[in-house]
Image (spheres, grey):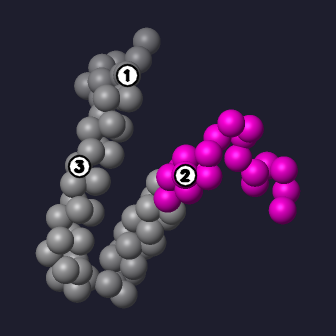
Amino acid sequence: MDKSDLPPSGQSSRQELSALDADFIRVLEDLIDALLSNGTLRLTDLPPQALEKLSQRKRVRQRLRNSLDLIDDGEELL
């Protein structure tokens, strides 16, 4: 194990696991998107609860992206 794999001193294992879970969830979202785009998976294959959670995360991520967009697409750059 590399030192970079270890949690910073003072960070609990629970916090480390939480951070890893968040990263892993993003990997799963990307995997689902890839499977959907190549036709291996269809949205109708997902249980309604999973589809709703995925949709909620996509909406929140889109809002976050929009809030970080400092230049309006309609604005001309000088």
* Amino acid at the residue labelled 1: Leu
Q: Earlier in the sequence, mark 2 or mark 1?
A: 2
Q: Position of residue 51 (x, y in %)?
A: 20, 70
Residue designated by label 3: 59
Q: Is residue 67 above or below residue 11?
A: above
Q: Is residue 23 visible?
A: no
Tell which residue pokes out farthest to the left in this image: 48
Q: Quadrant of the C terminus?
A: top left
Task: Determine which quarter of the picture holds residue 38.
Answer: bottom left
* Amino acid at the residue labelled 2: Arg
In the image, 74 versus 30, the foreground residue is 30
Q: Is residue 61 above or below residue 2?
A: above
Describe residue 46's horizontal placement relative to residue 16 as left or right. left
Q: Position of residue 73 (x, y in %)?
A: 30, 29
Tell which residue pokes out farthest to the top in this image: 78
Mark 3 surroundings: few (<14), some (14-19) or many (≥20) residues within 10 A: few
Describe residue 13's horizontal placement relative to residue 38 as left or right. right
Front position among marks 3 and 1: 3
Q: Which dot marks residue 70?
A: 1
Q: Which dot marks residue 14?
A: 2
Mark 1 surroundings: few (<14), some (14-19) or many (≥20) residues within 10 A: few
Q: Earlier in the sequence, mark 2 or mark 3?
A: 2
Q: Residue at x 41, y 17 (%)?
A: 77
Q: Which residues are magenta?
A: 1-21
Q: Earlier in the sequence, mark 3 or mark 1?
A: 3
Task: Find numbered disc 2 in the image and state the secondary structure of the residue it sits on.
Answer: helix
